[in-house]
Amino acid sequence: MKRLSDISVIKEILTRHGFNFSKSLGQNFLINPSVCPRMAEESGAAMGVGVLEIGPGIGVLTRELCQRAERVVAVELDKRLLPVLDETLSDLDNVKIVNADVLELDLNKLIAEEFEGLEVVVCANLPYYITSPVIMKLLEDRLPIRAVTVMVQKEAAQRICAPVGSRQSGAVTVAVNFYAEPELLFGVSAGSFMPAPKVDSAVIRLRVLDEPPVDAEPDKFFKTVKAAFSQRRKVISNSLSSGLSKSKDEINQILARAEVSPTARAEQLSLEDFSRISKYI
Ligand code: SAM
C-alpha cells in the first residue's frame, strides 16, 4: 500500500473516485505524515485494545491505529468514502467501517458488540462542526472507554484544557472536567490539512475518570453550569437568575447556602462551587 499521507497519493485516489470535499461535513484530511503516527501512539492503541474512530476520511489515521490496536471500528457518515476506504484499507483484517452519523449511534451497544474483552479508547480527527456534541456524547453516555484522543480546533483545545476557575474556562471546560482529565498534547498547523482550514488545530487527550470528582446529580449540575455561563460577563447572581428563571432573592439565598459570592463570575467558580450550588437549586 502506498503512503496515504503522501499528498500526491491522496490526490490520485480522490480524483480516481471522483471525490470532492464537503465543507459541511468538516472534511479536512490530514496530509502531514508525522501527525497520525503521533496521534495513534498517544491514543493508547495497542494489542488488547479496541479503537473507536470517528470520521476516518480516506483512512490515513485508521491505518496507523490498525497497525497498533487489536481492532478498529471507524464510523463514517459520508457514503462516498466507502469505496475509497475499501481500497485504502484492503490489506488490513482488523478494521470495520460503520456507515452512520456518530451522533445518532448507540455507542454503548456498538462497543459491547464490537470490542468484547478489549479495553476501549477513542481516537479521531473530529469534524469541527460537531466537536462539542461528540465529546459530550462520548462522556455523558458513560461509555466503557479509557481515553479520548482527538484533534480539534486550537481555540476549542485551549478552552477544554483550561483550568476550571480560569479566565479561559467555559461551560465545556467544567463539563469535560466532570467526567475526565483533559490534557493538551500538541499543536497542528492549518497547513497539515487538505484543504487547509482557516485556523490551527491541536490534539487533546481526555482520560476518563471512574467517578466524577465532585458529588453532584449530573442533570442539576449541568443545568447550573449552563445557566451560569449563559451570560459569562455578568455576575453569577444575575446569570443564574435569568438562566434558571428564578428571582434574584431566591438565587441569593441559594448562593449564601452554597457559600458562593453573588458577585463572582462563572469563570471563577470551581467544580465544588458548582456542585454545592446545584444541590440547593
Ligand atoms: N480522519 C480523516 C483524516 O484525518 O484525514 C478525516 C478527518 S475529517 C476532519 C472528518 C471526517 O468526519 C470526514 O471524513 C467526514 O466525512 C466525517 N464526518 C462528518 N460528520 C460525521 C458524523 N456526524 N458522523 C461520522 N462521521 C462524520
Image (cartoon, rainbow, N blue to C red):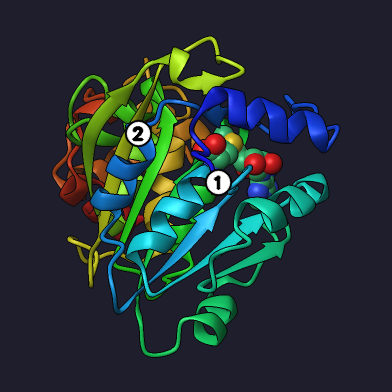
Instruction: Inspect the image, locate mark 1, and give the three-letter code of the amino acid beneath it.
Output: Pro
User: For mark 2, does the 10 Å Cα neighbourhood hold few (<14), some (14 to 19), or many (20 or more) residues?
Assistant: some
* Residue placed furthest toward the front: 1
Residue 71, given in percent of the width and then of the height, sits at: 45, 73
How many residues crowd mark 1 within 10 Å: few (<14), some (14–19), many (20+)? few
* Residue indicated by mark 1: 133
Mark sitting on residue 35: 2
Residue 154: name its quadrant.
top left
Q: Secondary structure at mark 2?
A: helix
Residue pictured at 36% horizontal, 68% vertical: 69
Residue 190 in sight from this viewpoint = yes
Q: Is residue 39 above or below residue 91?
A: above
Find the distance from the CA under tag 1 to the CA under tag 2: 24 Å
Please name the residue shown 45% across and 22% down the image: 231
Taking depth in this image into account, of 135 and 230 the one nearest to the observer is 135
First in residue order: circle 1 vs circle 2: 2
Image coords of residue 109 (percent x, y): 58, 81
